[in-house]
């Protein structure tokens, strides 16, 4: 028998409930509360995006000017607007062409120098490739492989609910 959904707690009431009471709720209540919480989170994210977009529009030109005055293209600048200090960070994200770096490593080695003096070298194995390898190759790589797990998630879906 399905418990009546009209008497389920709200998200606000849930805040004040001991975890033991939350655990004891009927599963359909948990499913609906989870859906409500996800919806509230998405709404809050949309609102945050909206506010941050407005802030960016308001201060973008001043940040560009402050960065130019400081003689830098990226990094953090500060300026005042009334009693508010605005701190704007434009991070630098550098990407390296892996194939070209590999060529440079070989050139450095061929020149008799140690590439490790100039760059950090790391190796990665795509998991799909690893699982497709022949068993003897996988066994050779196994001691170098560590598997960690991510955060477990649960999604409760009421029977009959789409998606």
Image: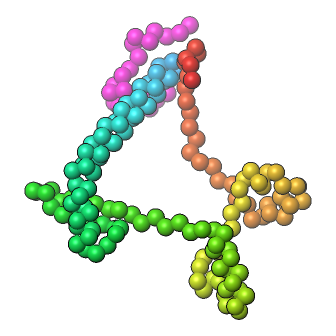
Is 20 located above or below residue 80 in the figure? above
Closer-to-camera residue (74/26) = 74
Closer-to-camera residue (13/156) = 156
Residue drawn at the location 25% of the way across and 49% of the way down? 57
Is 157 located above or below residue 123 in the figure? above
Tell me, what colour scheme is on the image? rainbow
Q: Quadrant of residue 155?
A: top right
Residue 3 is one of the magenta-drawn residues:
yes
Q: Tell me the quarter of the image containing the N terminus.
A: top right
Image location (x, y in percent) of residue 9: 38, 20
Instruction: Determine if residue 87 is in view.
Output: no
On screen, residue 86 versus residue 137, left or right, reads left
Image location (x, y in percent) of residue 60: 26, 56
Q: Quadrant of residue 90?
A: bottom left
Please state the total of marks drawn on the protein image: 0
Residue drawn at the location 58% of the way across and 15% of the way down? 159
Residue 155 is one of the magenta-drawn residues:
no
Residue drawn at the location 22% of the way across and 72% of the way down? 69
Extreme residue in the bottom direction: 112
Image location (x, y in percent) of residue 157: 55, 22
Image location (x, y in percent) of residue 131: 79, 51
On screen, residue 17 versus residue 81, left or right, reads right
Extreme residue in the left direction: 82
Q: Tell me the quarter of the image containing the C terminus.
A: top right
Extreme residue in the top direction: 1
Q: Which residues are magenta?
A: 1-23
Residue drawn at the location 56% of the way across and 69% of the way down? 96
Q: Main secondary structure of the magenta part?
A: loop
Instruction: Determine if residue 35 is in view.
Output: yes
């Amino acid at each position: 028998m399905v418990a009546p959904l009209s008497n389920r707690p709200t998200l606000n009431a849930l805040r004040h409930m001991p975890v033991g009471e939350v655990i004891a709720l009927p599963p359909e209540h948990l499913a609906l509360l989870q859906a409500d919480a996800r919806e509230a989170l998405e709404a809050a994210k949309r609102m945050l995006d909206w506010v941050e977009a407005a802030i960016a529009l308001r201060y973008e030109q001043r940040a560009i000017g402050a960065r130019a005055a400081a003689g830098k293209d990226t990094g953090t600048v500060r300026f005042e607007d009334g009693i508010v200090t605005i701190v704007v960070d434009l991070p630098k994200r550098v990407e390296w062409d892996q194939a070209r770096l590999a060529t440079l490593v070989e050139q450095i080695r061929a020149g008799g120098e140690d590439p490790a003096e100039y760059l950090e070298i790391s190796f990665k194995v795509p998991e799909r490739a690893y699982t497709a390898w022949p068993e003897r190759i996988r066994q050779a790589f196994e001691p170098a492989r560590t598997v960690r797990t991510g955060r477990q998630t649960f999604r409760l879906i009421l029977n009959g609910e789409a998606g």
